[in-house]
Amino acid sequence: MILCLDVGNSQIYGGVFDKDECILRFRRTSKTGASSDEFGLFLRSVLRENNVDPEKIQSISLCTVVPEVLHSLKNACRKYFQHNPFVLQAGVKTGLKIKYRNPVEVGADRIANSIAATYLYPNKNIIVIDFGTATTFCAINAEKEYLGGVIIPG
């Protein structure tokens, strides 16, 4: 099973996948200042409460737009699951070509959304809209090139 964590400005969205099926969805506040123990205990607790054995988690993936929580979350994954999480961030090879002057400026959330969209709609020109704390629009062409986008208040 794979534990996936998407850390936004207001919420942490989580999901557990068994093969290609999402068997659990959950969320909690992404308040900064939470310790690795708080995150780890929360994650193990939510899994157990939903009849998912934490020992069955084989890997963990996370992306965040809140850098302050990354250290605590990574430590929680190591301490409570004995896994180094895969972190989607600048420099990770995804198959998506970022056509920005400075690709590091593209948030991990926008990259994750774009990768998912190109997987769900291969060889299509796509506009991805994410209604979160901020609303983002991202344009991806059929060649899996991230062309850009805008951010507006949510």
Image (cartoon, grey):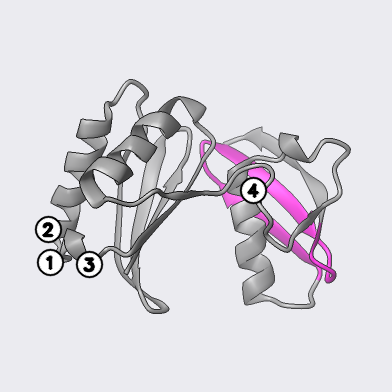
Query: Is residue 21 toward the left or the right of residue 118 in the image?
Result: left
Name the spot of residue 11 as percent of width and height, x first: 39, 39
The kind of residue on which mark 4 rests is Arg
| Position above or below: 86 against 24 | above
Q: Nearer the viewer, residue 45 or 29?
A: 45
Q: Amino acid at mark 1?
A: Asn
Q: CA distance from mark 1 to mark 3?
A: 11 Å
The span picked out in magenta is 125-145
**Residue wearing tag 3:** 56
Q: Position of residue 94 (x, y in %)?
A: 67, 59
Classed neighbour count for the residue bearing mark 4: other residues with Cα under 10 Å, few (<14), some (14–19), many (≥20): many
Quarter-of-image position of residue 28? top left
SS for callout 1: loop
Disc 4 is placed on an element classified as: helix
**Residue drawn at 48 percent across, 33 percent down:** 9
Q: Which is closer to the viewer, label 3 or label 4?
A: 3
Sequence-wise first label, 4 or 1 = 1
Task: Give residue 89's position: percent from left, percent from top.
Answer: 60, 43
Find out whether the residues at labels 3 and 2 contact each other: C-beta distance under 8 Å. Answer: no
Question: On the image, numbered disc 2 is attached to which residue?
Answer: 48
- Separation (CA) of disc 3 from disc 2: 11 Å
Q: Assign the N terminus to one quadrant of the image.
A: bottom left
- In this picture, is 153 found above or below 137? above
Instruction: Residue 110: give its label.
Output: 4
Identify the mark at residue 35; answer none if there is no mark: none
Mark 3–mark 4 Cα distance, whole angstroms, equals 29 Å
As drawn, 2 above or below 6: below
Residue on which disc 1 sits: 51
